Amino acid sequence: MKLTYFEKGFNFSQDGPGNRLVYHLQGCNMRCPWCANPEGIPLEAPLMVDRSRLVDDVCPYGAIRNGVLDRSRCAECADRPCLSVSRNQGITVRASTLEIDAVWQEINRSRPLFFGGGGVTFTGGEASLQFEALSDLLRRCQAAGINTALETNGTNPRLPELYPYIDHLIMDVKHGSSEQLQAVVGQPSTHIAANLTAAVSFGKNVLVRLPVVGGFNDDDQAKDDFLEFMNQFDKRFIHLEFLRFHEYGISKWQASGQEYTLDERARVSTDQVRDWQDFMRSAGWQVITT
Ligand code: SF4
């Protein structure tokens, strides 16, 4: 069994407590236009193109003309010499695929670094798309006493199977209206609601995150929709966190051959984020700030 991730590294107290080894797993079933890691959306890791360094000779099959890659030509390319022979000349693939035994050995070797209550976090993309590999690693971590966190969009109906092996569950709920979610990111909130209900029934504490994005969820209707959605659940088990939309991922949309569709209307101020926090606090919800 193998695991494919497009990024890994340590961070401190961002996705779970303490110093954590974070794996970003390849592939997502949502298409959020504000995604900061768009290279992690396709199930198969995309070619990442740096146009400032790309020359036509990098592709011996003529897929690059005047520094522009025709990606339709790459679909049938089995040997991909642009990645091996012409290494580091403007085309890369960021993802790595490892046997889970190798991933587990890496986690185990890293144990001395999990200070401050740290451990391992799996995120994405949507980590639960690689369900069997994720499940196996979470089980191994828990059996070894390694703290685990999962950041998920909450749409996988099998998510509750993982709850016994997750110490910190982080669920991104981007909008309270299922119709808006479906329209903008391509998934309804049906399974998100069921999975949150199951988490609370399981007695699991959940951190629910909402990215505040202009034109998507920054108005009063969006606040009312979100409050109505959240009021289905027991407040005692849930903390909320509101994240300000940022544009760090823009260059990666282009580099990975995907269209970036947002513009300056998506930007929000810190005051708008504070409005969200105040709105939910005044309704009795626990809100954290970082
Ligand atoms: S994947 Fe194949 S066709 Fe595409 S740029 Fe690389 S070598 Fe050329």
Image (cartoon, grey):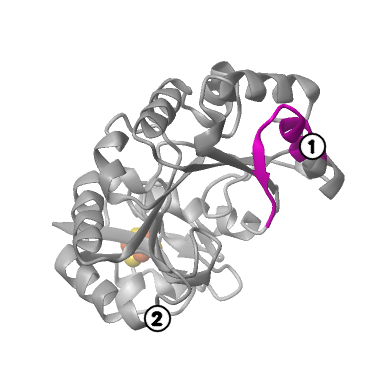
Q: Is mark 1 within 8 Å of ligand 1?
A: no
Q: For the point 66% across and 19% down, which residue is it?
A: 225
Residue 41 left/right relative to 231? left
Does the rendering let one see residue 54? yes
Ligand 1's quadrant: bottom left
Asked if 58 appears above or below 33 in the picture, the reply is: below
Q: Quadrant of the C terminus?
A: bottom right
The stretch of residues the image draws in magenta is: 275-290
Residue 270 left/right relative to 10? right
Tag 2, which secondary structure? helix
Cβ atoms under marks 1 and 2 closer than 8 Å = no
Residue 118 screen position, x and y as percent: 43, 69
Q: Which residue is labeled 1 in the image? A: 278
Q: How far apart are marks 1 and 2 (CA)?
A: 37 Å
Does the rendering let one see residue 79? no
Reply yes or no: does residue 71 show up in magenta.
no
Q: Which residue is labeled 2 in the image? A: 113
Residue 85 screen position, x and y as percent: 31, 80
Viewer-nearest residue: 4 or 60 = 4
Choose top left, top right, bottom left or bottom right for residue 68: bottom right
Q: For the point 21% across and 67% down, which residue is it?
A: 144
